[in-house]
Image: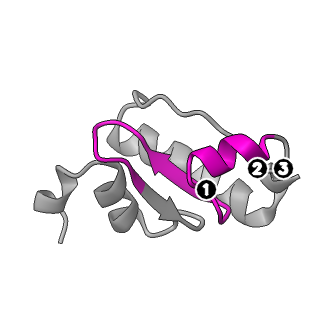
Amino acid sequence: MAANSPNSVRALTNLRAICRNYFNDQPQIEIVDVLEEPHRALADGVLITPSVVRISPSPPRMILGDLSDVKRTLVILDPQQEVTLQ
């Protein structure tokens, strides 16, 4: 199962930590396992795992990998961070 792969586990752990530290756990997160829901993953444009797709606010943005680069992840998840992170 893709959700149990080492990179996916690291990505989910990192995403939860980022949400807790920077967003007060407010973002709504939906996990789609590409092996269980391949059509849904393709519809969302997920071709590589792990991937995080930020749907709102528009435009949608995607980040790949284990999300260990916190600054890059924050810029993708919250464009407002582009001003404050350098």
Which residue appears at 28% of the width and 48% of the height? 78
Outermost residue on the right side: it is 1
Residue that mark 1 sits on = 46
The answer to if 22 sits in the magenta stretch is no
Q: Is residue 85 left or right of residue 35?
A: left
Kindly state the secondary structure of the residue where label 3 is placed: loop
Residue that mark 3 sits on = 35
Confirm whether residue 33 shows in the render. no
Confirm whether residue 36 shows in the render. yes
Q: Amino acid at mark 3?
A: Leu
For the record, the magenta segment spans 37-61
Which residue appears at 44% of the width and 38% of the height? 20
* Rendering quarter of residue 58: top left
**Closer to the camera, 55 or 68?**
55
Residue that mark 2 sits on = 34
x, y percent for residue 29 = 53, 33
Q: Amino acid at mark 1?
A: Val
Kindly state the secondary structure of the residue where label 1 is placed: loop
Q: Pointer 2: residues within 10 angstroms few (<14), some, or many (20+)? A: some
* Circles 2 and 3 in contact, beta carbons < 8 Å: yes
Q: Is residue 13 left or right of residue 62?
A: right
The span from disc 2 to disc 1 (Cα, nearest Å) is: 8 Å
Which residue appears at 68% of the width and 40% of the height? 40
Q: Closer to the N terminus: mark 2 or mark 1? A: 2
User: Relative to 85, does residue 56 appear above or below in the rendering?
Assistant: above
x, y percent for residue 6 = 78, 64
Kindly state the secondary structure of the residue where label 2 is placed: loop
Q: Is residue 42 left or right of residue 23?
A: right
x, y percent for residue 8 = 71, 57
